[in-house]
Structure formats: structure tokens, C-alpha cells
Image: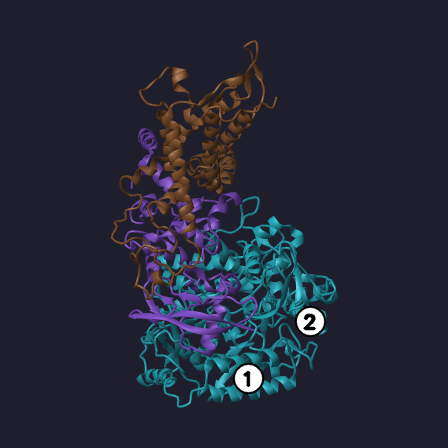
Chain colours: A purple, B brown, C cyan
Amino acid sequence: MSKREFKVWRGDAAGGKFVSYPVDVEEGMVVLDAIHQIQRQQAPDLACRWNCKAAKCGSCSAEVNGKPRLMCKTRLDSLPDGEPVTVHPMRSFPIMRDLVTDVAWNYTVNRKIPPFTPKKDTQWLMQQEDVDRVQEFRKCIECFLCQNVCHVVREHDKKDHFAGPRFFVRIASLEMHPLDSLDRIPLLKKEAGLGLCNITKCCTEVCPEEIHITDNAIIPMKERVVDRYYDPVQIVIRKLTGKDKKD
Amino acid sequence: MSDTSLASASASGGPHGLGATDRRDSWWLGPMLVFLGLVAFGVYSTWAAWTGTDYLLQSHGAYYLSPFYSPDVKDLFGIAPPFSFAFLILWIPLGFRATCYYYRKSYYRAFFLDPVACAVGEPKGRTYRGETAFPFILQNMHRYFFYLATIVLLFLWFDALRAFFFTGPGGHLQFGMGVGSIIMLLNVIALSAFSMGCNSFRHLIGGKMDCFSCSGAARTRYKLWKGVSVFNLRHQEWAWISLFSVGLTDLYIRLCCMGIIHDVRIF
Amino acid sequence: MVIIGAGGAGLRAAIECSAAGLKTALVCKSLLGKAHTVMAEGGIAAALANVDNQDGWTTHFQDTLFGGKYLNNWKMAEFHAKESPDRVRELEQWGAVFDRTGEGKILQRAFGGHTYRRLAHVGDRTGLELIRTLQDKGIHQGIDVYMECTITRLLKDGPRACGAFGYWRETGKFVIFKAKSIILSTGGLGRCFKITSNSWEGTGDGHALGYQAGAQLLDMEFVQFHPTGMVWPPGVMGLLVTEAVRGEGGILRNNKGERFMEKYDPKRMELSTRDVVARSIYTEVKEGRGSPHGGCFLDISHRGAEYVKKKLPSMYHQFKELADVDITTGPMEVGPTCHYAMGGLKVEAATGATRVPGLFAAGECSGGMHGANRLGGNSLSDLLVFGARAGKGAADHARSAPAAKLEEAEISAAADEMTGYFSREKPENPYQLHVELQNTMQSLVGIFREDGDLKAAVEKLQEYKDRARRVGVLEGNRMFNPGWHLCRDLQNMLICSEAITRAALLRKESRGAHSRLDYPAYDEYWGSHNLLSEDRNGVMDVQPMPVVSSPDLQTLVDERKAKEKK
């Protein structure tokens, strides 16, 4: 059994630092196993979130060697040998303690999105091809790694004007639902701040569920906003045919 | 990278300073390659368009027109501005690529460092408005550049097919093939693959619909959308392939015109 | 209204309560939407008859009873079979997006123990779909959610439950909820065992809180070992491999390449009930025909890469990323893992009420629905049906209940218990004790049990209980301190472990998930009796009681029994 050095960020809202722990490495081990071992043997009060340990719940988000990852899905043998592994809490959210951050902002955003509202008198028939896109978005496990890595949040701190990739995906899943009756395009343009996204794709890069956030959710939503607000021909056609929706 | 590492966490978002990161991989390599690639293409294409010469190879019966000079408005419509007429056309493909969702990503990263790479800090003291204000709000016009670029693409297809016909001894056109014909064909295929994967096109062809099965027309558009999605998945790759192919096609014709190399006629 | 636990049952109950106009607080140990329900993969069993039109509630009822070896509460099984189709359709109307049939209806897949293709599903992430749908419905309906808050004690006013005491995980500060009705929906107790598919939350909180408040625990000896958990690498041992793999045609083989289920259940093969498949795998391994890492082989690669990736995407990724195994080209190694507690708080079938006035339970922490063994897919439908029923029952109770008052003495006792962990002189390491408890339960009260082992386990548990009084905080303060949290969770696990072991000792037969090497056959008496545990002045008392039957369902039950005899 070999040893590996882990540098785990310890501290709270007031500040903190990386603390080194030696970890016994087993075959097939992931970063979360190492954190558990540290809890069991060296730091019983090391705070970290986790639940399913199978990349299905999205609790154990952190930054491993500087990259936003799920700890339960990051194998030690995928990290460069011979140097310490650093584990840092997500940087875009306020620190609670050690690896635990306050992700309440995300829940606040979600509350503002009008929920699924079915069309009247529907027979509830949908073909698989109609729901494929929506199902991709609904794979989201709300690990908030995309929210964490997005530079609009992380570097520009636009939390008050920007919903973030996770909720663009959420809105896309509602907008593309064949039986939904609401219109969330004005929300996207205004409160959700879709225009602040400059599609630099970091959200897609970090998504553990491999959702094509940018190409399948954000860009199609941007195009729908263009239809409504920027495309002069479509605006004129809507005016002429009287189909102009109020926002 | 320990000197740029963020020793303590900031309470929440905020500029961390350029290059501040705990990443230890070569995150700077990607944006640097993009930077070099785009600069190299920019310099070459500007120069090639500027010259106004060596864009049409007509020796040995061939008719190879450089994609930078297509359509040949001078020949077709007699338009002869006091500068190279290539500039009358090039703003279209330039605008198409500049507003392309993929290129936006790449140059926001490589040129504007906004962000330079994922989970890497940005320069401090900038105001960020994304694509909500001038000039980047104009990115929303991407679809119009797509329409225009499609017209240019039709000319390029014509040019590529024209390159398979050579003027024979009697002045008649006859079918043939030179290395240049193949290059021009491959180039226009690459350009088409790039255009076919356009995100705006994908939206307009079918992506804007919520129900794919609700009518016969919807089902047809669904099939087209599926096809476009295949190209869209590789939009980045086609963006680079077609960028290089268009530059190399011009270079090939240019070198032939200058007599530095000679086109090989296959049959 | 206070609902403890925000998995499927808790959320569904909360939706029902707030729809009834009651102020509803939903308290959970983790963040909202992270509950163990997300790990349910295969689907929701409901006789929608979208794929097999012969299906109906009577068949579902019979399948459930047959799977539970007739120890189920008949009324619960009836409500469940009758109401689950409506609960599934309701989910769709709240925004869930199930896989579709060619006609555009909800698609259903085959599963172990179900006569017809019955499981409404979304690939292999049905639980996530369910919880996300309920979560969105709930928050927009105005439920107050209190996240990362652990309840340590139920507060009573005389015989009535009227409040809950707990702490915020973030700050360690105490919190008191006052309520006219309380619903426990805390899920399972898998963390009592070493190899388990349960997350850290599955510490039997609801079981223990209810028991301590005076409610009874039913069927605790029945702990379901899911036949297919991952066995390698060590870090993911026990991680669930969905039954949908077998539902989609997966084949089990031993190291000789034999399809061994032919020996154990030639009729149902891989889709036999979970207890049978788990025992079969265990036996193969014990007799030396196991895979290199102590499991057996499960192969789905014959269905083709595209199909597997489409229908079992998360399994594909799970094996690819965690075990370097490509399940589209080769077999995966699997072995039994502790998965589900059939046992739980004894409740009224119609309302989810325990015998403590004002205290209700739903989902895994309640008992009776599944009898001796739960069928795959019946847990998601269980938590929808009985989440809704408990929500309604609790709401009705709250409307008619007079205001209760909290006892100061109880509150300070609860607070003292929690602060006490900081003042142990030589604190016992809670992590160490937890490991020992898990090892004991795994080796002595596992898939196969016998008298000597169980008696040894009872003694061990007595020792652990003494040591648990001495566990304490080794380091850190009250802010987000997992060591401190574990001190309290251990107490719950010990109550559950004791109930499991004592009931297992008494049930001198093998039935469903309970297998005694010394009593390998069915016993007639035990075939019609459940075991009920309750607290009598600090001592656990376990007594048999007759199965809750119902004359109107007798014909259906007899019909199925006759059919199985043939």
C-alpha cells in the first residue's frame, strides 16, 4: 500500500489554509475515499458533504487540484503522481466550514422559475423523440459545479442578475417540454440574465452528467431570445400576423 | 503554479486576478494555440485579400478561383473598387465566423481572457456585461451572417465544380481533374460541414420547435434537425478544418499563379 | 406540520399537507434533492397496463404479497396496488418526463417478481426524476424547507407527539419545531451494515425516533440484501447496480460460466425475487464459484452497446469510471449489498398513523407494506402512495388536534444529550465503534443467520450500547462537525441493530429476506405472524402478532397461493 499526500483546505468564513494529511492509497480509490479516511483516522471534525458516493446526488462537489469535480468520481490514479492532491471547497460560494460551502443562492434562483404548467385538455401523449432533449436536461444532479465554474459568477459575481448554467438547463427543460404552456423567454432575457453568458463552455466542461449545457440548452435558449427580441424579420412577421406575445 | 495559487478562499465570487488558480495542468496551452492559430490566419488572409492578384489560375485550361475572391464580382458584374474587391466579399465569412458560437468561445478566452480558462482567474478591475451591450450584443445577428454566408457558399460550390472542367484545345470545356480541383472540392465540403453545424441553423431548422412529432412537417424538420445536430456536435473541429482549408486553397492557387508550384493534372 | 426527511415520501407528504392548507415544515439532514431516493434507479411499479394490457391492481397486489411471503399488511398492499397508477400519472402532470411507448404513453419495463412489465422509468435514474419533480412541485407550493438540520428527539405532551428537537449541521445550534402532527420519512438503516448501498444518512433515524417516542417497530428482521452491488474497487463496495440490468436482459454467471439461476429458480431465472437471487449469488461465492473479487458476473453486453448506453447510462458510466469496466463489451462483477429495510414503524394502512397520537410515518421507515421481502420498484410507488396518505392523515389530525405545549424538561434533556458528547472524559471514537458495529451486523446478522451468531450479536450489541454512552467528540466544535453528528447517529443505529437481531433470533424459520441456516424451511406459525418490537421501560420487548389480513382480499390471496403450488 502506497502513501499519498493530501492538502485539504481547512477553515471557515473567517479564513483558512491547506493542511497536509498522509493517506494510504488502495486500488481504485477516489478522492472522497481519501477524505473519509482522513475523517476516520486523522481529522474527525473535517467537514464535507456527501451522500450517494456514486455520482448520482451531486453533494461532494469540490475543487481537486484546482479543477471543479465530484470527489466521488475523481480517481486518484487519474491525478498526477508524485505531487500532493489539493482539495479546496468550491470558490464561488461562501465558505461554511472546510469543504462545505453555502449553496443557498442556487435554491433561491430555482424558486423564481415558474414551474411546469401543462397545457389545458392534454391527453398526456408524448413521443420519445419529443422528450429526449428534456430528459438530457433532467439528468442534472444539481452538483452546482457549473454554477461554481461559470466566470460570470466566479469572477464577475453577478449572482443578483444571473441564473447560471444549471438554471438555464432547468428553464430549457421546461421551455422544450412539449406539453408546457408557459413562456419563460422574457424571464431568460431579463431576470435570468442569459445575455451575460458568453458561452465560454466551462459549465459543459465540468458537468459530471455530461449534459451538453452550452450547445443543447444555453445556445438554443439564446436563439429563442433572438427570435423574440433581436431578429427584425421575425418581429415584423409577428406584428403583422398579430402573434406578438406580450411580455 | 504555487505563486499564483489562491492561498485562502474569498468569501464568494469576485475577480481573483489573472492566472490565479490551483490548476496544475497546462491550462494556458489551449488559449495560446487558439491565439496563434487565429492570428496566423488573420495575417495571411488579410495579406492575401490585400494583394488583389494571383487569385485565379487559368493556365493549362484550368479555372481555379481562390475562395477569398469568390464570387468574382469584377468578372461577373464588372465591379472594380479602388481596393482589392476581396474586401467586398470577405466581411461576410468574417462576420459569420466572428459571430459563430464556437469562435466566440475561443476568442473570448484567447483574446479577451474572459475567462482565459476554466477555474482560472481573470484580470481585475474590468466591467463585465457579457453579450448584453454593444458591441457583443450584435452577436445576436449571427443568423443573418449565416444566410449571407450560405449564398457565398453556393458560389464556392459552383467554383469547386467549375474546377473540374478544363478548357480543351478546341476551346470546349471538358471534364477533368487536377490536384487543385480536389483541393477546392475538399475545401467546399469542409466549409459546408462548418455551415451545416451552425447553432443558429440548428435552431431555425427544427430546434425552435417544442414538439417534433406533432405534424408531418414537424417530423421532417426533426429529421433535418437530427442531421444538423450531427455536424453541430463537431462544430469546433469543422471550424478549424474549414479555416485551414480555405487558407490552404488560396495558398495553393496563389503559389500556382506565381509559378512557384505547378498544378498536377490527374486526367 | 413537521415532516422529518425530504426523500420521496417526505416530499410527497409535504405536498399533500401544504395542499390541504397547512403550514408545512420539511426538515432534512442533507441539502434538498440529495436524499437516498435519487439512488432508486429501475423504476416505479404501477399497474398502468401501458405495455402489458392484462395487468391490473389485483395482479400487482398478488405479486406484492407473493414477494413479501404473505407477511405484508394486506390493506397496505391493496392501497398500494390500487393507487400507484394515479400517483405515477400525477407525477407526469407535475413535470416528470418518463420514457415513452410507441403510442406516446409511459413506458414500462420488466422487473424481478412482477408478472407483467410494470415499472415506469426514466433510463436508470428514475429516483432522481421523482425527487426533482416533487422538489419543484413542493417549493412552488410554498413548503418551508429546513436543510441540513438533524432531528435528535421527538417531543411529547403526555402521550401526544407535539414537537421535534434538533441541531443545525452548519452551526451546531439547537432548534425546536412545534407541531400538531409529525411525519417521519427518514428512509433506511443500511449504515448498520458494512456492505451497503445506503448513504451516510441511512442511520435509521425515523425508526429510532419513533421507537423512543413509544411507537412500535414491525418486521425488523427483514433486511433486504440487493443481489447486485459493486464488489470492486473497495471504495465503492456495496454501491448499487440497478435491477434494471437484469430487467433489460442481464445474465448472471459464476466463474465457470454457468448461468446458475437455472439451479435456484429455473422459472424466473435472473428476475426471481431479490431474496432468492441474493442468496443464490452468496451460495455460489461461498462454494468457490465466485468472481475474482468475491462476487459473480452480470453480463448485459449481448444487448449491444447502443442499447445499453441508452437504457442504462448511469450504470455504464459508473462501471467505466469507477471500476474501469466497459459493460457494453464485458460482464460486471456484482455481489449482495444491504439495501432496504422492510421493517419499520407500525402504521395504520389508511393514514400512516403510528400508535403515538400525532405521529405518522411513511416510506422506508414505516413497516408492513413489503412483508418479508420487497419487490423492486415497489419502494418508489410505496413512498408516493403512503407519502400522500400519511400527508393527508397528518393534515386531518392536525386540523382537529388542540394546541400542545412543549415540556421544558424534555427540551433540556435533549440539549444535554447533544452537549454531553463534548464533555466525555475519555471519549470513545465514534468512527471506530461504527466500524465494529457494521462488521458485527454484516458477519453475524447478514444474509444467512443462525442461533449462535445471533446470540453473539445480541451480546456484542449490549457491549456497544455501553460504549456508545461514552462516545464523544475528539476534535472540533459544534460547527459542521461530522464526528459529533456520528455520535448521535450511532445511538439510532444501535436501536435498529438490536431490533433486527432480536427479531431475527425469534423468527425460527427462513422466509423472504430472513434466512436461518438452522431453520431453513418455512414455518406455518411464522407464516402468519409478524414480530413487533417496542420499548418497555428501557428494555426492548419483541412479540409476535398475527398478520393484518382482510376478508375482502382473501379470494385474491388464495388464488395466488393455489397458482404457486402448481
- Which residue is nearer to you in this view: C365 or B95? B95
How far apart are labels 1 and 2 at the CA level?
A: 34 Å
Q: Residues within 10 Å of mark 2 (few under 14, many from 20)?
A: many
Image quadrant in which you'd find residue B124: bottom left
Q: The residue tagged with tag 1: helix, strand or loop? A: strand
x and y percentages locating residue C239 in the rendered image? 55, 66
Please give left or right for residue A105 compared with residue C362 in the image. left
Please say whether residue A234 is visible from this viewpoint. Answer: yes
Please say whether residue A118 is visible from this viewpoint. Answer: no
Is circle 1 on the same chain as circle 2?
yes
Q: Is residue C321 above or below residue B84?
A: below
Q: Quadrant of the C terminus of chain B?
A: top right
* Residue receiving disc 1: C542
x and y percentages locating residue A30 in the rendered image? 51, 66
* Residue receiving disc 2: C285
Do the residues under discs 1 and 2 have CB atoms within 8 angstroms? no
Q: The residue tagged with tag 2: helix, strand or loop? A: helix
Please give left or right for residue C418 compared with residue A29 in the image. left
In the rendered structure, which disc, 1 or 2, sits on the residue that comes first in sequence?
2
Find the residue positioned furthest to the top: B170
Find the residue positioned furthest to the front: B260
Please tell me whether mark 1 or mark 2 is closer to you in this view. 2
Amino acid type assigned to the residue bearing label 2 in the image: Val
Please state the chain letter of the residue tagged with numbered disc 1 in the rendered image. Answer: C
x and y percentages locating residue C302 in the rendered image? 67, 53
Q: Residues within 10 Å of mark 1 (few under 14, many from 20)?
A: many
- Which residue is nearer to you in this view: B209 or B133? B133
Amino acid type assigned to the residue bearing label 1 in the image: Val
- Which residue is nearer to you in this view: B27 or C28? B27
Residue at point 28%, 51% (across, down): A161
